[in-house]
Image (cartoon, grey):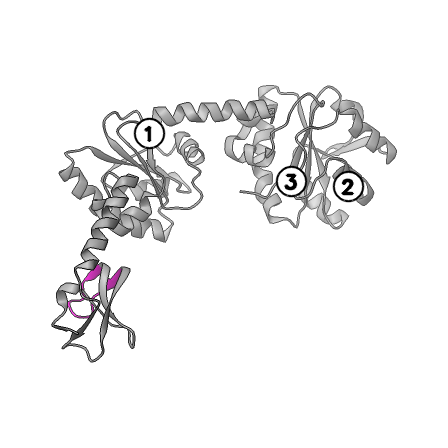
Amino acid sequence: MAVTADYQVQFPENDDIYSILAAEGIEFLLSHSGEVPLEYIHGKTICLFFSANWCRPCKDFTPELVKLYESLQKRGEELEIIFVSFDHDMTLFYEHFWSMPWLAVPFSLSLRNKLTDKYRVARIPSLVPLYPDEISVADDVIGLIEDYGPEAFPFTKKRKEELKAIDESKRVLVSDLVGKTIGLYFGAHWCPPFRSFTSQLIDVYTELTASTKGSFEVILVSTDRDSREFNINMTNMPWLAIPYEDRTRQDLCRIFNIKLIPALVIIGPEEKTVCTNAREMVSLYGSRSYPFTESRIVELEACLKKEGDSFPRKVKDKKHEHELKLDMAKGYVCDFCKKQGKFWAFSCDACDYDLHPTCVEGQEE
């Protein structure tokens, strides 16, 4: 997510922007077709867009803002965005402005500093809606747009609360597979950790499908870059998926605040979120994680402790020259049987040597 500006929730009336422009002797704004008189923006919702050509977050966010602007124009919304440049020179200013369909104030260090001070802009990109004092603006307009697109308009605190309420209602609807435990699986084919974890999740899914008699289901929430990657992804998976063209995918990523993939979110049979980090549980405990609740984690940890207490602290194995100590490891390969191991191992402090407890041949010291 792009870095956003630190500005106050309340903003002055639009008259202030005219006063600042007048003090700088500015009578026109800039467009790609020439100068535009200030009267053109009267009666419109005005947003100041503070940005720069050298700023990567700005260049990443600008295309999103363009889509929003064009969408709102088609809807007939009286919105005008005005670009305020943080560029170092006129050439970079025009290069950046060329990617924008809205207006701009003339390139001026003095004007930029006055607008920056007036609207308390600390970082870019920053989008500052200009409303009368009685209208409260959302505290993260850039983030609001990244999450909701054109639906974020008019960028007020009230609109943000409305959108959050809609999200909460969708959270219930998503859980509408009554009586089943659902794993919402977020990821993309291009992501190597996702492909690696998918293999493990398929094994877990196969085991649980049989042992729970169909009470566990996985649904892919794709973050693939295009439908071709999505289709490749689905050829390797035995579970369901939300269609690539369905915007529910983006909604779920926002609702569950997915920042890293792969991610596995568990919705319980009572239609409530049980676990938002089930990937770690599956990686550690496999199918034993089911039903992925906190109480199940407590049970598994107690079982592991009991198992560890049953082993000696040190052993001397005839296959290895050094003393081996009991250790806990998330994963390892036994140097004798060459099979994967988890949790308990007898390891050598002097060299990289590990044994499954069942592969030890020797006497406890």
Position of 41 relative to 195 (above/below): above
**Mark sitting earlier along the chain (1/3):** 3
Q: Which mark is residue 112?
A: 2
Magenta stretch: includes residue 337:
yes
Magenta stretch: includes residue 332:
yes
Labels 1, 3: front one? 1
Compared across the picture, whether 201 is left or right of 207 comes to: right
Would you say residue 125 is visible in this rendering?
yes
Question: What residue span does the magenta drawing correspond to?
Answer: 331-341
Q: In the rendered structure, which amino acid carries the disc numbered 2?
A: Arg
The residue wearing badge 3 is 5
Q: CA distance from mark 1 to mark 2?
A: 49 Å
The residue wearing badge 1 is 272
Q: Helix, strand or loop at disc 2?
A: helix
Position of 74 relative to 359 (above/below): above
Would you say residue 107 is visible in this rendering?
no
